[in-house]
Amino acid sequence: MRLLVSSPVGALGVHVEAGTVVGVRFGATAGTSEPHPVRDELNAYFAGALTSFTTPMEFRGGSAFERAVWAEIAQIPYGETVTYGQIATALGDPGAARAVGTACNHNPLPVVVACHRVVGAGGKMVGFGGGLDRKRRLLELEARVTFQRSWG
């Protein structure tokens, strides 16, 4: 099933097979609007009411390295960022920051596996398959919610 989900960063196409999310893409133009738990979770995320997804997800495709990068990205807490270099180091290859960036660009589950939380050295806003404007908006959403919760 292909869902079309409206969001503050544009329409998302969400591919679901047997109840498992296997793909998310920006700029979707077609899909169903029928109810589904991942739609509810995405709406709650964008409303600032959800900080982690529970709908089952599965990475399909990708090299062993890409899958390792995606697994690392999935561990980044809501509202926090890490650098491409930090992920490369965590995977045992400190010189692989660019390869980590390429793997992030190939992430089949953006937003739900939050590659927008990966930034360049020194916190620089670089690279994002959905465009830097979307990355900035997603990070701002999470920062605002985190700030409100810590002061609220």
Image (cartoon, rainbow, N blue to C red):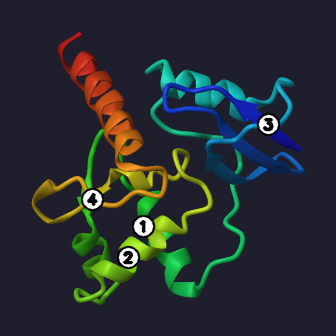
Nearest to N terminus: mark 4 or mark 2: 2
Instruction: Reply above or below: 132 against 44.
Output: below
Left or right relative to 87: residue 12 = right
- The residue mark sitting in front, 3 or 4, is 4
The residue to which callout 2 is attached is: 100
- The residue mark sitting in front, 2 or 1, is 2
The residue to which callout 1 is attached is: 72
What's under tag 1, amino acid-wise? Glu
Furthest toward the left, the residue is 122
Closest to the observer: 145 or 131? 131
- The residue mark sitting in front, 1 or 4, is 4
Residue neighbourhood size for the residue with mark 3, other residues' Cα within 10 Å, grouped as few (<14), some (14–19), many (≥20): many
Residue neighbourhood size for the residue with mark 1, other residues' Cα within 10 Å, grouped as few (<14), some (14–19), many (≥20): some
Q: On residue 27, which mark appears?
A: none
Kind of element beneath mark 1: helix
- The residue mark sitting in front, 4 or 2, is 4
Instruction: Reply above or below: 108 against 86.
Output: above
CA distance separating discs 4 and 2:
12 Å
The residue to which callout 3 is attached is: 3
- Asked whether the beta carbons under mark 2 and mark 3 sit within 8 Å of each other, the answer is no
The residue to which callout 4 is attached is: 126
CA distance separating discs 3 and 4:
29 Å
The quarter of the picture where the C terminus appears is top left
CA distance separating discs 1 and 4:
18 Å
Nearest to N terminus: mark 3 or mark 1: 3
Nearest to N terminus: mark 2 or mark 3: 3
Kind of element beneath mark 2: helix
Residue at 63% across / 78% down in the picture? 62
